[in-house]
């Protein structure tokens, strides 16, 4: 169907009311469930940290899971709420391909921060001693 | 599906039609949002870099554990989950407003826009409360061999590791009289307590302080405040401008501007912006509160 106001727009998406409402309802439930799972993982991390000797690997794993869940949430918001999933492929690609820069952006900068920490700890012993959390100081 | 077949046969680049099947304004809104994603991305990545360069970083569950009206109860993640749900729900009402616009349903657009505006305002209110709570909070820190009472600000972070008991005892001797007075009053509210404590001598004041109850910490990394207030502030500013845009859309709808125009595409563009604000919050929530 031609758009009423823009003749250069060739077609419009038309879904009937019932299908649309169902899609929105399902996405809302999905986003809420993912958020609740994230909160549960957050509380798990909190309880692990409270313990005597926190298992850092387990905490890291839970944090990784939360990151993946967040990406899933972002996907559903962009694809369903912002209707990007319904646009034509070329348009989607002009948005998504530039965002791939983030893969390098995140990796390189996190790596750099970590490297700076290691260099400082190696060459500045006073810095290491004054900032490194010790068991009795702990984060809590 | 019939449309899919026609779509594949359509020659998109022969002129006369939009190769992206989208009007100019909406396409440009998408590119603006993409550039804005890089701005937020750069801020969050900068925060991540600094966080990875530190030996110690405050545990978000220790910093964000307050709830309005719950006093000093320890409720990690509770308030921020309310904020997250408020924003998700306001995103859903915006989807419904855009959908009502597609079917030229003026009443529907007005109704759902009002709910979206209420959601946005509620989120801003929550954020204002949280900032106020962090800035005006009174936390005892051990710094430079004496005790201080500070809040979370751009210049100081009270969320370092717990200070060893013996160092706190020693620091108590070097702490100023005013701070001691403040410490002795923490937990004892009311004017009579204030007057009682003011009359005490310096030694009596020292004896009245229960060190174990103060939960004295060392100072945490100072960058925490700048990043938290900077990024949540920048996001809050986006929410604020989104609310303003939605109010303008509401007024234009009520005046019948879109009705005369024959379409509600402006609502769609405002909707894209509003969903983007929700999208950014998902990542702010992840970076500051969850991990």
Image (spheres, coloured by chain):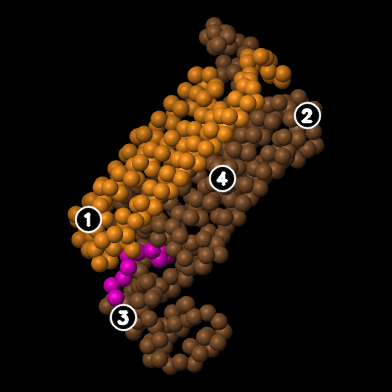
Chain colours: A orange, B brown
Distance CA(mark 2)–CA(mark 1): 65 Å
Decide whether residue B158 is among the magenta residues. yes
Residue interval drawn in magenta: B155-165
Frontmost residue, B284 versus A56: A56
Marks 3 and 2, Cα distance to the nearest angstrom? 73 Å
The residue shown at (24%, 63%) is A135
> Relative to B233, does residue B176 appear above or below in the rendering?
below
How crowded pointer 1 is (Cα within 10 Å; few <14, some 14-19, many 20+) is rated as some
Q: Percent x, y for residue A113?
A: 31, 47
Q: Are marks 3 and 2 on the same chain?
A: yes
Q: Nearer the viewer, residue B159 or B221?
A: B159
Label 4 vs label 3, nearer the camera: 4
**Tags 4 and 3 touching, CB below 8 Å:** no
| Residue that extends furthest to the top in the rendered view of this protein | B9
**Horizontal and vertical percent position of residue B127:** 55, 55
Q: Viewer-nearest of labels 4 and 1? A: 4
Residue B87 marker = 4
In the rendered view, tell whether residue A129 sits above or below residue A73: below
Indicate which disc, 2 or 4, sits on the residue closer to the N terminus.
Answer: 4
Residue identified by numbered label 2: B259
Q: Which residue is mark 3?
A: B169
Q: Are marks 4 and 3 on the same chain?
A: yes
Q: Chain of mark 3?
A: B
Query: Of the residues tagged 3 and 1, which is closer to the observer?
Result: 3
Judge the density around disc 4: few (<14), some (14-19), many (≥20) Cα neighbours within 10 Å. Answer: many
Q: Are marks 2 and 1 in contact (CB under 8 Å)?
A: no
Q: Chain of mark 2?
A: B
State left or right for residue A121 relative to residue B269: left
Percent position of residue A130, x then y: 26, 65
Q: Chain of mark 1?
A: A
Specify whether residue B192 is painted magenta: no
Q: Is residue B86 left or right of residue B105?
A: left
């Amino acid at each position: 169907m031609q758009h009423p106001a823009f003749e250069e727009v060739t077609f419009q998406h038309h879904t009937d009311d019932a299908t649309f409402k169902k899609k929105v309802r399902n996405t809302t439930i999905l986003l809420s469930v993912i958020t609740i799972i994230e909160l549960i993982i957050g509380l798990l991390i909190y309880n692990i940290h409270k313990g005597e000797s926190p298992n850092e690997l387990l905490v890291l794993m839970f944090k990784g899971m939360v990151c993946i869940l967040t990406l899933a949430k972002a996907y559903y918001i962009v694809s369903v709420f912002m209707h990007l999933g319904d646009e034509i492929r070329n348009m989607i690609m002009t948005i998504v391909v530039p965002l791939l820069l983030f893969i390098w952006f995140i990796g390189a900068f996190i790596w750099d921060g970590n490297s700076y920490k290691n260099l400082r700890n190696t060459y500045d012993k006073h810095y290491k001693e004054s900032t490194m959390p010790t068991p009795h100081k702990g984060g809590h | 599906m019939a449309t899919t077949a026609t779509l594949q046969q359509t020659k998109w680049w022969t002129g006369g039609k939009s190769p992206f099947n989208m009007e100019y304004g909406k396409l440009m809104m998408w590119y603006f949002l993409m550039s804005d994603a890089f701005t937020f991305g750069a801020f969050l990545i900068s925060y991540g870099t600094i966080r990875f360069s530190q030996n110690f970083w405050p545990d978000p569950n220790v910093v964000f554990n307050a709830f309005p009206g719950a006093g000093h109860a320890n409720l990690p993640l509770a308030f921020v989950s309310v904020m997250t749900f408020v924003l998700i729900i306001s995103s859903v009402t915006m989807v419904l407003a855009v959908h009502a616009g597609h079917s030229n349903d003026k009443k529907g657009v007005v109704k759902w826009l009002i709910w979206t505006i209420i959601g946005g305002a509620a989120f801003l209110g929550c954020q204002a409360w949280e900032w106020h709570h962090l800035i005006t909070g009174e936390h005892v820190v051990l710094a430079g061999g004496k005790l201080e009472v500070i809040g979370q600000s751009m210049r100081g972070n009270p969320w370092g590791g717990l200070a060893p008991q013996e160092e706190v005892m020693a620091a108590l001797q070097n702490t100023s009289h005013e701070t001691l007075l403040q410490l002795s009053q923490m937990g004892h509210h009311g004017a009579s307590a204030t007057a009682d404590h003011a009359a005490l001598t310096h030694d009596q004041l020292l004896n009245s302080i229960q060190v174990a109850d103060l939960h004295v910490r060392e100072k945490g990394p100072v960058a925490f405040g700048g990043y938290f207030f900077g990024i949540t502030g920048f996001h809050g500013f986006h929410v604020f401008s989104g609310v303003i845009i939605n109010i303008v859309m509401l007024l234009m709808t009520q005046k019948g501007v879109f009705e005369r125009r024959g379409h509600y595409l402006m609502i769609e563009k405002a909707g894209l912006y509003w969903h983007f604000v929700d999208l950014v919050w998902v990542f702010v929530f992840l970076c500051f509160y969850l991990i």
